Image (spheres, rainbow, N blue to C red):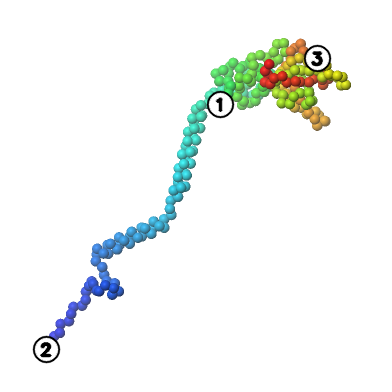
Amino acid sequence: MTVQQQPPPPSPFAQGPPGDGVRRPTSRQQRREEKARARRAEKAAAAERRPRRPYGQMLLAVLLIAGCALGAAVAYSNAGDTTSVVAVTDGVARGETIAREDLTTTRVAGVDGAIPAEDLGDLVGRTATVDLLPGQVVVEAASTADPIPAEGEALVGVSLEPSHLPSGLTSGDSVRVLAAPEEGANPDTEGAQLTNAQVYAINDTQVAGTGSSVQSVTLIVPDGDADAVALFASADRIVLVETSAGGGG
């Protein structure tokens, strides 16, 4: 009896002809490479899904932070440039004598003519040449060692219609004081001038019941001319002519 030998079954790892469409197990090395390729593909996909960092906004934020730091440094530097100067605690009216309790010290920067704190005592007893308000820094031109009015001078108040004085007249301006002619009379240009004077104060005053206003002007005049100026002022016959601004001669 003849026994026919059967061929061994095909190995599952046997390689078939290429392109036969059969998926076959791969070697261990191939599996590792496939896993590595899969991990790389997954990382690339995750990177694509991850939102891009807003580098432009980050740069702007960095610049803003740097700018704020620079501003703070400048402010700190400027603060170091302040100096201690004299300031007013309570208001001092023009013409009043400055007392010690009217003054204090404060730190400021860039105030021209400010009185240094160490010179505070020198201001006591001086006369205010302007109205000093609470908190105001005292400058050199705000006071004088001479009383107002000084010896040989007098203060005279006049109320003037707008046509009797130049517009823009302010304290410290120098003026000629003229006597206006009586109503209906011809002007006497040769005898019109009463005196020279300086404007001490000027204010706009409403006339009750009329709706109009007049300029209330206080003049510093020579004592010998004060009576004549006051009498002409009472008759509304004073006219002012500005000769120089700011108290110049």
Q: Can residue 101 be seen in this view?
A: no
Residue 59, image x and y in percent?
A: 45, 45
Instruction: Classify 10 Å Cα crowding around label 3: few (below 14), some (14-19), many (20 and above).
Output: few
User: Which residue is denoted by mark 2 in the rendering?
Assistant: 1
- Give, as a three-letter code, the residue at label 1: Gly
Residue 69 visible from this viewpoint: yes
Of discs 3 and 1, which sits in the foreground? 3
Image coordinates of residue 157 in percent, x first then y, are 76, 19
The residue under label 1 is 110
Q: Is residue 219 left or right of residue 55?
A: right
Q: Residue at label 3?
A: 190
What amino acid type should be assigned to the residue bearing mark 2? Met
Tell me residue 9's x, y (percent).
20, 77
Label 1: element kind: loop
Where does the N terminus fall, quadrant-wise? bottom left
Q: What residue type is labelled 3?
A: Glu
Residue, x 64% and y 14% (percent of image)? 145
Q: Which residue lies furthest to the bottom in this view?
A: 1
**Alpha-carbon span between mark 3 and mark 1:** 50 Å
